[in-house]
Amino acid sequence: MALFAEIAKAGTFTKAAEILGMPTSTLSRRISDFEDSIGVRLLHRTTRRITLTEVGARYLQQIDELIQQAHAINEELDSEMSSPAGPLRVSMPADFGAYFADAHFREFHATYPDIRFEFFMTSVLPDLMVEPYDASILLGDPPAESRLIARRVGTVRQNLYASPAYLERHPAPTTPSQLADHQCLLMPGADPDEGWMLRNGAETARIQPRPLLSANSQPVLKQLVVEGVGIGQLSRTFAAALADAGKIVRVLPDWELQPRALYVLTATRLLPARVRVFVEFLLEKIRPLD
């Protein structure tokens, strides 16, 4: 269709072939094949020039608007793939959303001011093949059967913390097994029965405390730890300022919870510019995330 329109506009196969950047013989053959496939002659050919048949003239008039629309769509797609602009829709856990807003959002927005943000806070991994998200942030490894493109952007390291007031009432544990005697505040994982996996160098200990509370929100756990409710798991990022101020204390300081990987997932590697720069920004800024 587009080749026929270009020939009609140029007036000769030679000129059209120069514009299209292909051999004249190839262009002529493709138009002949097209005419044969539709069973209609569109062009009158002479040694000097070509003219449209009556059917060819009507066909050109009918396809002209379609070709203009196709050009407009292609220009829009080219712009989307090359210019970081438009809506960026990302699903993410609420904790990561709070971290990104506090640590990185202002810089990212200043670098790419034409991007509009639509962040959706959820702990459930959406199906990016069918749901209207450009990307998704996942804490933990993607499902083995996932068809999504996963890029690891960092590692979240967590420790156990308690308030000084709590430790005054309950002597601090000196071994992981003693956590069974404490009020514990857990962040649920993929397996609700997995408990805590603690590491001290090459030594490991899996503990399954009876949780006083389980919540998929670090701000909630942090507040309860500060108020002296129990021993809770917090990432180093969330705990740092409070630990420096002496409001919370690391428990079992030689041990840490098993680190969890942080991924950004997309449905394809062929990304619009607004999504590509977001992924590249995460890869640059967040590794490693503690």
Image (cartoon, rainbow, N blue to C red):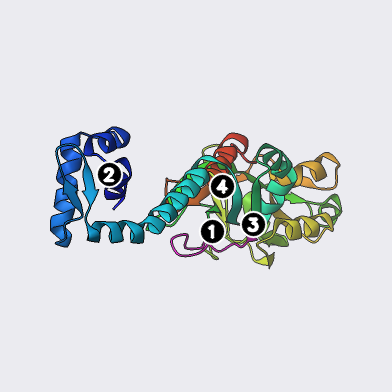
Task: Decide if residue 252 is in sight here.
Answer: no
Q: Earlier in the sequence, mark 3 or mark 2?
A: 2
- Per the rendered image, the range of residues in magenta is 118-133
Q: Alpha carbon of mark 4 to alpha carbon of mark 3: how far?
A: 28 Å
- Percent from the top left, x then y, of residue 66? 39, 58
Q: Residues within 10 Å of mark 2 (few under 14, many from 20)?
A: many
Task: Decide if residue 163 is in sight here.
Answer: yes
Element marked by disc 1: loop
Please report contact status of discs 4 and 1: CB closer than 8 Å, yes or no.
no
Q: Alpha carbon of mark 1 to alpha carbon of mark 3: how far?
A: 9 Å
Please report contact status of discs 1 and 3: CB closer than 8 Å, yes or no.
no
Disc 1 marks a residue whose amino acid type is Tyr
Quarter holding the C terminus?
A: top right
Q: Alpha carbon of mark 2 to alpha carbon of mark 4: how far?
A: 66 Å
- Residue placed most toward the observer, 206 or 120: 120
Q: Earlier in the sequence, mark 2 or mark 1?
A: 2
Task: Provide the major secondary structure of the magenta segment.
Answer: loop
Image-based side of 255 in relation to 271, left or right = right
Q: Residues within 10 Å of mark 3 (few under 14, many from 20)?
A: some
Provide the residue designation for mark 4: 258
Does 49 sit above or below residue 31?
above
Disc 3 marks a residue whose amino acid type is Phe
Q: Alpha carbon of mark 3 to alpha carbon of mark 2: how far?
A: 48 Å
- Percent from the top left, x then y, of residue 158? 64, 47
Provide the residue designation for mark 1: 133
Kindly identify which numbered label has been placed on residue 7: 2
Q: Earlier in the sequence, mark 4 or mark 3?
A: 3
Q: Nearer the viewer, mark 4 or mark 1?
A: 1
Provide the residue designation for mark 3: 119
Disc 4 marks a residue whose amino acid type is Gln
